[in-house]
Image (cartoon, rainbow, N blue to C red):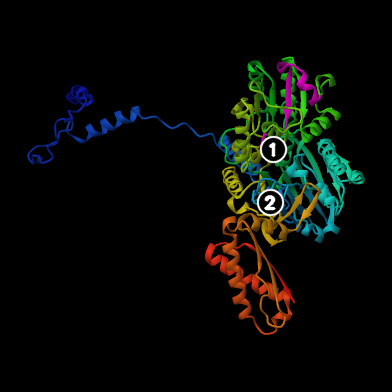
Amino acid sequence: MAEETREVQVTKPQEQRKPNNNRRPNNNRKPNPNQKKVVGDSSAKPKSNNKNKNRNRHKRQPSPVDENLKAFVVKNQEAHKQRLNPHYKLDLNSKAKIRVTPLGGLGEIGGNIAVFETENEAILVDVGMSFPDEDMHGVDILIPDFSYLREIKHKIVGVIITHAHEDHIGAMPYLYKEMQFPIYGTPLPLAMIGNKFDEHHLKEARKHFNPIEKRKIYKIGNDFEVEWMHMTHSIIDSSSIAITTDAGTVIHTGDFKIDYTPVDGYTADLHRLAYYGDKGVLCLLSDSTNSHNPIPTGSELSVAPALERVFTKAEGRVILSTFSSNIHRVYQAIQYGVKHGRKICVIGRSMERNLEVAMQYDYIKFPKNIFVDPEEVANMSDKDVLIVTTGSQGEGNSALFRMSIGEHRHIKIKPNDLIVLSSRAIPGNEGSISKMLNHLQKCGAKVAMDRDIHVSGHASIEEQKLMLRLVNPKFFLPIHGEYNHVMKHKETGMMCGVPERNILLMTDGEQIEIAPKYMRKVKTVKTGKTYIDNQNNHAIEDDIVMDRQKLATDGVVMMVIQVSEQTSKMLDKPKVTTFGIVPDRRDKAFAKEMEEIVENFLINMKPGMIDNPRGLEGDLRQVVRKHIYRKMKRYPLIVPNIFIH
């Protein structure tokens, strides 16, 4: 026993040494059969057991599991599931449903209008206008096609207004010339709609105004309960709305961004959105305009330092142009103008009107003695003037554009003027803005259009995520924007936990039926645009616009032909007049060519056609059109006039 103990003491330090890894073990060594196993021998089995014991001595033992704590982990996981899963909050046994039909605002920027409809009643959310393309000649604005509203006129119990931008209220007077319903909205949008009614000689329509108080629920008709929640945007007094029916609550964001430091201090009512989200929201309709922007939208207050620099460096007059509806931008500019000792001249009908309304209803306050009329500016020192005007998009009839080409009655651009464009270019307006900039710079003026002079009024990706997480809807419908905008917003919705099967990408005219258990497309209604001429505020027929497009792109051919009733031959050479087809020097050659075409047509004319001048003109029109297309690859407007003698 003493020997065994001594052997263990001797071998223990050797076993703790690190093995020599450079030596390869000799696995071919054969055991000696004559060698006996000794109990105390270090090569015997007890030695390896000893080694395992030493290793296990340094191995970390697992902490004991508290079963009570583990039970609460499960409970909290279940609480998260209940909190984040909106299915549990809706009445899945309800048979009620609501239908949503956008009539404008999808596949485009602007023209926003949507119908929310139950079995017996309907409400409209916004009635906006949009602007025409370059090839819509003589068209000033576009308004939605009201065909579907005529069909359901008996069901409509009210019009809900989210905010006062033209693309949300611009078509109101055209709708109210035809049909009238109660109008619900906050004071500023109603005041601006009232101005439009006055311009269109609809003063009596003001009787339909129903001003609302935010955070208060209004019963509209029998089927709808609507609440307005304050929202920050590039125009003051904007709102998101909660529409509650038997099917559940639908949240419509309107246009929005999340501004944590707005100029007036009235932040977005995130608490109320969260209240509805916690209560359970059936569907969210959310603004997609800025859905590609990963950078959070800047606060309106962040423009202030840039405006300060503008007035500090300006050596002459400052002419600031921005959207007339951006009252807080104009408000800040006027504040800095007054701070630097300048008088304020407001030019542009929409700018004057919007600023006047905002001051009348105490949204902003300024003493009247800081303002001067345009005719007074010429008699003032340049350093004492701030001109606030419209025209940041280069519109041909805007005040700033007329100044740039020297046609404004009171203001002429000077070399020491500083022009500040505090807006972004709306897609499609880049060409007109560039043209205006060229004119301004030819006059010698300096132009400032830095990024920090403007911030967007629409939510970026991060703000859209916040909206989705606060509202936590079961179904999601991205709205307001072109297809690529709503598609990108769909991706953001999926990132925020809305299943792809619960998101639909709508187009104008598609009717979506929403119930607690499902959302689906049910039908398509007639939609489109009506063309408006602002000079007389009347609609322009579609065929007139198409004729104008044809005249602009393909030209016109006018022909006067005299034909003998007895011989069916021409009595004289045809008189041919063209516009936009051939140059003047080729008019005679083209007229000769048309004479041959007419002669050949009359020779091959069907018997009896001479007695049908209208039919004769139609056939000749087709022959001439085909001939011109073969030679010139164009389809001009053909106007033949055949006189039978």
Which amino acid type is shown beneath numbered disc 1?
Phe
* Image x and y of residue 108, in percent: 65, 48
Name above or below for residue 227 compared with residue 298.
Answer: below
In this picture, which residue range is highlighted in magenta? 373-394
First in residue order: circle 2 vs circle 1: 2
**In whole angstroms, how far apart are the C-alphas of marks 2 and 1?**
33 Å
The one nearer the camera, 213 or 308, is 308
Can residue 583 be seen here? The reply is: no
Name above or below for residue 223 compared with residue 605.
Answer: above
Nearer the camera: disc 2 or disc 1: 2
Name above or below for residue 437 compared with residue 554.
Answer: above
Name above or below for residue 609 compared with residue 28.
Answer: below
Helix, strand or loop at mark 2? loop
Q: In which quadrant of the rendered image does the C terminus lie?
A: bottom right
The one nearer the camera, 577 or 393, is 577
* Image x and y of residue 311, in percent: 67, 18
**232 horizontally vs 61: left or right:** right
Which amino acid type is shown beneath numbered disc 2?
His
The quadrant in which residue 76 appears is top right
**Residue with the mark numbered 2:** 137
**59 horizontally vs 226: left or right:** left
Task: Give the numbered dot on residue 256.
Answer: 1
Residue beneath the point at 61% across and 80% down: 603
Based on the picture, tell me whether residue 383 belongs to the magenta stretch. Answer: yes
The one nearer the camera, 468 or 261, is 261
